[in-house]
Image (tube, rainbow, N blue to C red):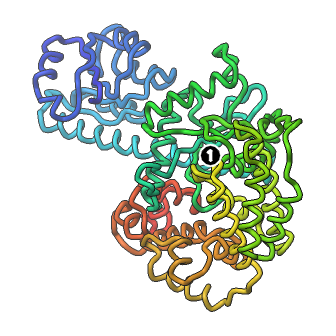
Amino acid sequence: MLKVMLVDDEPYILQGLQVLIDWESGGFEIAATCSNGKEALKYLKENHVDLIISDIRMPEMTGLELLETVKKEKISDAEFVLLTGYDDFAYTQRAIRNGCLDYILKPVEEEELIAVLRKVSNLNRESIILRKDREKMEDAYLSRVIRHIIRGKYAEEEIDYANKHLQLAGGLRFIYIGFVQKDAEADTAISDDYDMGTIQKQLLNACRETLKEYVNHFTLEVPYDEDIYDVGFIYCENMADMRDMSENEFLNQLIRKIEVLFIKPVRMYCGKVVPDIASLSESYESCKRLKSIAGFHNTKKLYFYEETDTNYSGIVLCKNTIDEIIGSIAKNEPAAIESGIEKLHGELRGKDSSNVAFDLNINYLLFQLIHLASELDDTVNQEEIIQYISEQASGEAFARGSYQHLKTFALEYASYLSELRKSISHGILAVIEAEIRENYAGDISLKYLGDKYHINSSYLGQVFRKKYGESFKNYLTNYRIREAARQIINTDKKINRIAEDVGYKDSDYFIRKFIEIMGCTPSKYRKTNRGD
């Protein structure tokens, strides 16, 4: 309901206006009635209203003086409508120059009042749309600034912008807040990109609702690969200090509160502490490394990068056996890989019931495998390798120390490296490019294309990035947005219909992506390019 203030020195006019129309059915409510400008001014200084309907002639302070005072001192942004007689026209002109929306001649007719209220409703609706568009643009720009900062490719003005819009105090950590994508009981995973994107958005909303005063510290625009649906979080030590809590206590409490709203298990991966926002890329990189090896540890809610440096004195590192396994993986020798895993199993069996020995040896194996691919092909994007390993290492069985899962992973990784050695014909990329043009609005992904054309999807992602200079997901997003921009200019279809036609079921997500790529909202893009 829009709140209305009625101001007139004649009581019968105040009463008449209140009963002249059904205010509520029009979306309005009478918030206050005042008998002169001074009384109205006092009320406005302490209360919010959306519309002021005032007589132009009153004792003590006229309606015109009330209008000029409110506008000059910025007491209220309410719309102003004046009640006037025929001989007040000169005053009315002065009022309009001072920002008065409209005037109504006395005696007030029902139709005139309804017409003015409809005008106010439309303006309010437009104002809400503009405000939401502005908020979306600001959110998209801040996300872009954060993305530049965490990748270490930022301008100084972006650091200033981040400092202005984020509450930064004390040391900082970059944190990934993730959810368990796999349903352990049903042994099925959510695969639809839209469903995953919707769940990710629900997680973001739960995070922001839980920590309302730090809403700008949560963002979606930071994942380093195609299939990460986590929420990025810039944590400041001051968040825990203000609540007289330790960092561990604060983050564990935050996880519990998010889970209450999100209704799904949540995990946090905390990068190392850095002194300021300009150094956040170091924390981001450590966070990625932590997430890539988290699957090899016992499952828990909260991981810290510092834990990877735990003192393992007295625990045996089976370096020779692991080096043999790595050599077998590099040569893609399945039998040697399997026997090497069995040998490692035998060496570690019974050494440490808490799985600490298993963690140490698997961490060593994992880091060697990350570098192995780059040694085989120095053009390989190491982030893609981290992605592949992170995906394969995320299973619960591996986290519990299953050697059968380790064996399967090693065999699949060897096959993956074998793909890296092969040259893939440009013909297949041309076919895939044609399929994107034909089916860009459908549910297509690297996994779908890999299965369809019998190519390792992770390797296909590497080749795609080399040719086009961006990930498959970004390429598809840019293609969809460019097609949406074409339709926005050349058709009269509604924006949400265009969003659906180019493959976005969530219109808010579509608008955010459009702003990020085109630099403005779809509606503004249409107005600007069509001269509306």
Q: In the figure, residue 334 lies in which quadrant?
A: bottom right
Residue lying at 75% horizontally and 76% vertically, measured from the top left:
332
| Image point (72%, 36%), residue name | 304
Between residue 173 and residue 418, name the one nearer to us. 418
Query: Can see residue 162?
Result: no
Q: Is residue 309 shown left or right of residue 135?
A: right
> Amino acid under label 1?
Arg
Q: Is residue 210 left or right of residue 240?
A: left
The answer to whether any part of residue 8 appears in the image is yes
Q: Specify few, some or many for label 1: CA neighbours under 10 Å numbering under 14, 14-19, or 20 or more.
A: some
- Taking the spot 23% from the left edge, 29% from the top edge, the residue there is 28
Q: Decide: is 38 above or below 291.
A: above
The N terminus is located in which quarter? top left
Judging by the rendered image, the residue that carries numbered circle 1 is 400
Residue 350: image quadrant is top right
Q: Is residue 12 above or below residue 94?
A: above
Callout 1 secondary element: loop
Q: Residue at x 64, y 35 (%)?
A: 302
360 lies left or right of 228: right
Location of residue 419 with respect to 198 vertically, above or below:
below
The percent coordinates of residue 296 (x first, y second) are 68, 48
Image coords of residue 290 (percent x, y): 73, 46
The percent coordinates of residue 529 (x first, y second) are 49, 68
The quadrant in which the C terminus is found is bottom left
Q: Position of residue 489 (x, y in %)?
A: 44, 71
Tell whether 97 sits left or right of 299. left
